[in-house]
Amino acid sequence: MSVKSKSIQNKSKDERLRKVSNLKVLLNRPELGALGGSVLVFIFFGIVAGDTGMFSAYGTINFLEVSANLGIIAIAAALLMIGGEFDLSVGSMIGFAGICIAIPAIYWGWPLWSSILFAFSMAVLVGYANGILVVRTGLPSFIVTLAMLFILRGATLALTRLITGRTQVPGLRVLIENDPIAWIFSADAFKGVFTWLGSLGLIALRQDGTPLATGIPASVLWWVGMTIFATWLLMKTRYGNWIFASGGDKLGARNVGVPVGRVKISLFIGTAVAATIYACVQVLDAGSADTMRGFLKELEAIVAAVVGGCLLTGGYGSAIGAAFGALIFGTVSMGIYYTDVDTDWFKVFLGAMMLIAVIFNNFIRRRVTENK
Amino acid sequence: MSNNLVEFNNISKFFGSVIALKDVTMHIKKGQIMCLLGDNGAGKSTLIKTLSGVHKPDEGEIIVDGKQTVFDSPRDALDLGIATVYQDLALVSLMSVTRNFFMGREPMKGFGPFKTFDVQKANNIASERMGQIGIDVRDPSQAVGTMSGGERQCLAISRAIYFGAKVLILDEPTSALGVHQASVVLKYIVKAASSGLGVILITHNVHHAYPVGNSFTILNRGKSMGTFDKKDLSREKLLGMMAGGEELDKLEVELKEIDRTSKN
């Protein structure tokens, strides 16, 4: 951009605007890497595993569900990362929320819906605690939430063993049927369509004539819904601008009146609540809670967010990117079973992908901030 | 009643036993550019922070539009139209021009929970405002990081003016800039003043201050050495009054000495 006196020529005729091709605009988007990566992954599995049933209705639902579960927490993690902070306690929060649902429902006789609400209020509390600690002490969120990772996981294990004498709490399945809100996290959508497709012979059926893939899992709808909501939040609301500002330059943002502390605390609450949504989906799907649920999920969420274009330093990234980051993750983690590749190699792929994503993002940032 | 926008009378500020400022008085009128000059450690930063409401003065009074006031926070000063553009500019380089321009004060549309950031309107205002000061923003959604230092400075100033500043306090706006960029910023400052704003320009660069200033306050070791109108002051005299003036003379003598001894 150059300094020059106000040009008299028509703005649309500005010759310098023409030079910015669509490609360049696309290159400056944070989600480009994840989008391109998704395409590559699909091409790869299309060639390697195209005829194995990976892309049948059942197979597709399978890898979408894995992606969706991760996507739910990755999107919240991405928003927080754009706001300039990390949350390493997400995985532990999943385990904690799981037993917050299961123990009251099974051991204390609470209705399932009330224990779900209880889990969400605990999430708000944990998120608030994370946020207020980071904002008030000025310590790196990495340390604060690492401490919370151990505290929550330990408390989950200790409390569960204290109350139940075990580390697993089964027996939720019977409670789901008549619960007024459990379906939000566990029901399949568009069942009719799948039955109809089954009856036409377009998708595979079981022995009893019901389709193998019974519908779109609730988690997939949560994933899509949260992506749309988070994108709207980032791009179209005042709060979204504050998220970018808080992560981009905390002091600058504060100097022009952005309530940086409030923004960050609310984002920490967001990741804890997303972890609880994840826990609801998992617990209600499995019918049991396990103290080790969500182990290492915080790191997977960060991988997805980073692959999706979020900068580790904050102030830049996108929710759509994180959603695609989760899709890559889910597709590869399930798709690898359809190939001849030993599944042990999955983590190698994961690490390499993250490394490439970070290098690529760094390049993008330089383009965005230094291009002349 | 005087026609001063702001008066700072006999401002003193102490940090424990340290006297950071003592009896500093400045009056700013509409359309006036008051240059505040001083070497490092002269108390410029403390004075800015006191003027902008970060510090409370221990002595003295602040009069805005003829009324005595106390600033409890920078927000109070801002509400009375006294805006400070700090050296760090409060710009986020990864964010777009528009998003920076309206950071914290986004224009909204819609009702209730569906209120959204009116990006279109914000884009239009941002490019129009930047256009007025001669910066042709190709694309207001472009990141601020792509702008030059001078353009960023102008963006920060133009943002302060748009949001109702009557008195602008500019902290070293030209210190990090090249000659051309600095002249662009200085031109803009003159333009802003001629449209009726009062400007306090803090700098240690006499060559930047002298051409644009109407009056000059020189700060030395926390005390004001007085305020001078331009007609009473030559550039050389101004240079000499800065703490560096004598020092530079001494340095010249010493350098000659070194030069002479090394030749022997």
Image (cartoon, coloured by chain):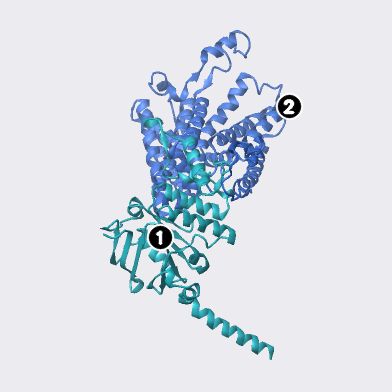
Q: Is residue A252 left or right of residue A40?
A: left
Q: Secondary structure at mark 2?
A: helix
Q: Where's residue A131, x and y in %? A: 41, 46
- Per the rendering, the mark at residue B32 is 1
Q: Where's residue A251, x and y in %? A: 45, 53
Residue lying farthest to the top in this orientation: A200
The residue at the point 33 percent across, 50 percent down is B79
Q: Chain of mark 1?
A: B
Q: Is residue A41 above or below residue B255?
A: above
Q: Disc 2 vs disc 1: which is toward the camera? A: 1
- For label 1, count other residues whose C-alpha is less than 10 Å away and answer few (under 14), some (14-19) or many (20+): many
Q: Where's residue B130, x and y in %? A: 51, 46
Q: Using the rendered view, name the quadrant where residue B47 is placed.
A: bottom left
- Per the rendering, the mark at residue A366 is none
The chain drawn in blue is A
Which one is nearer the viewer's eye here, B65 or A153? B65
Q: Secondary structure at mark 1?
A: loop
Which one is nearer the viewer's eye here, A155 or B184? B184
Query: Separation of disc 2 and disc 1 at Cα?
Result: 73 Å
Q: Amino acid at mark 2?
A: Ile
Q: Is residue B90 above or below residue A198?
A: below
Residue lying farthest to the front in this orientation: B231
Q: Give chain B's shade.
A: cyan
| Residue at mark 2 | A47
Q: Using the rendered view, name the quadrant where residue B49 is placed.
A: bottom left
- Looking at the image, can residue B151 be seen? yes
The residue at the point 55 percent across, 27 percent down is A65
